[in-house]
Image: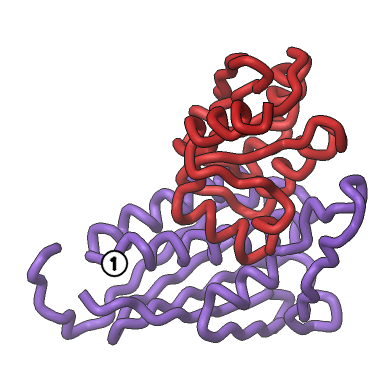
């Protein structure tokens, strides 16, 4: 572990990319390498990568309905042991213009009826400390925040 | 996506050599597993010890594989890394799959039940 003194300024960076699964993978890899360079612990990186992946997959799959030409913009800020992430897109709005409220899936069912998806929002909510969603001027803006282990 | 496999007694052991099972590879993953599973065996164990990232679409693909293997030939998983284990526990899929600490443990479990 490095003995880096606490940052006096927020560390902020952004990325823009297209809405395909492969671009999502590249973006996650870029974000993770930056967080690691900033000394974010491996455990926090793992949790954040998973939450961000679920948000981005949701945009690719639902906001842009699988089209790989949509644009996604990310802005990430690390400040005071907190990681804030804003994601925006100009795809379809969330149903009812609000964040989905996930239900736990019934698992006591036959093999054929086991769920093969639909966990994304439950995971995002469990992995983050807070999450907000706004739809303004045709743009989806989702922001979530999580605390970081102090180095 | 590379998945290697070998038959050890009654167990078909499939090892995912890639580090990620994400939405970019779910179709490939299921297709490769379908080919691998054409080798007859009593059990199929999926070794995930090299996988450091699995998202919900990746988990869905693993469940999909479990479904096409059918109830008589249940899919078991082995060697979950910390981030992968988290996805299984958050979704409570850890209650659906038989999970082994490692591929070796999974193979030993087979001898025990033979």
Q: Which x, y percent locates residue B29?
A: 67, 31
Q: Is residue B58 above or below residue B33?
A: below
Tell me where residue A92 sits by quadrant. Answer: bottom right
Who's purple, chain-wise?
Answer: A
Who's red, chain-wise?
Answer: B
Q: In the rendered image, is residue A26 in sight?
A: yes
Q: Which x, y percent locates residue A86?
A: 51, 75
User: Few, some or many C-alpha atoms within 10 Å of disc 1 (few <14, some 14-19, many ≥20)?
Assistant: many
Name the residue located 85 percent from the left edge and 53 percent from the top edge.
A114
**Quick one: SS at disc 1?**
loop
Q: Which x, y percent locates residue A18?
A: 60, 50
Q: Is residue A60 above or below residue B70?
A: below
Taking A82 as reference, is B99 left or right?
A: right
Q: In the rendered image, is residue A55 in sight?
A: no
Name the residue located 46 percent from the left edge and 66 percent from the top edge.
A48
Q: Is residue A87 above or below residue A130?
A: above
Chain of residue at mark 1? A
Taking A81 as reference, is B37 left or right?
A: right
Name the residue located 61 percent from the left edge and 71 percent from the top edge.
A124
Q: Which residue is mark 1?
A: A40
């Amino acid at each position: 572990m490095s003995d880096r003194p606490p940052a006096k300024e927020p560390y902020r960076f952004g990325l823009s990319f297209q809405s395909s699964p492969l671009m999502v993978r590249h973006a996650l890899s870029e974000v993770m390498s930056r967080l690691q360079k900033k000394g974010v612990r491996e455990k926090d990186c793992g949790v954040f990568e998973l939450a961000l992946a679920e948000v981005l997959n949701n945009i690719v799959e639902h906001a842009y309905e699988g089209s790989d030409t949509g644009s996604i913009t990310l802005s990430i800020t690390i400040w005071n042991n907190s990681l804030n992430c804003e994601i925006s897109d100009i795809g379809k709005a969330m149903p009812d213009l609000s964040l989905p409220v996930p239900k736990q899936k019934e698992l006591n069912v036959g093999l054929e009826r086991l769920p093969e998806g639909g966990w994304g929002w439950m995971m995002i909510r469990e992995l983050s400390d807070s999450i907000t969603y706004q739809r303004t001027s045709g743009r989806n803006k989702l922001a979530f925040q999580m605390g970081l282990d102090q180095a | 996506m590379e998945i290697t496999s070998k038959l050890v007694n009654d167990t078909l052991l499939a090892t995912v050599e890639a580090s990620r099972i994400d939405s970019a590879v779910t179709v490939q993953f299921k297709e490769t597993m379908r080919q691998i599973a054409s080798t007859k065996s009593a059990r199929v164990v999926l070794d995930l010890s090299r996988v450091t990232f699995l998202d919900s679409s990746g988990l869905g693909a693993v469940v999909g594989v479990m479904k096409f293997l059918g109830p008589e030939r249940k899919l078991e998983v082995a060697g979950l890394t910390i981030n992968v284990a988290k996805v299984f526990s958050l979704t409570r899929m850890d209650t659906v799959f038989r999970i082994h600490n490692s591929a070796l443990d999974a193979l030993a479990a087979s001898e025990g039940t033979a």
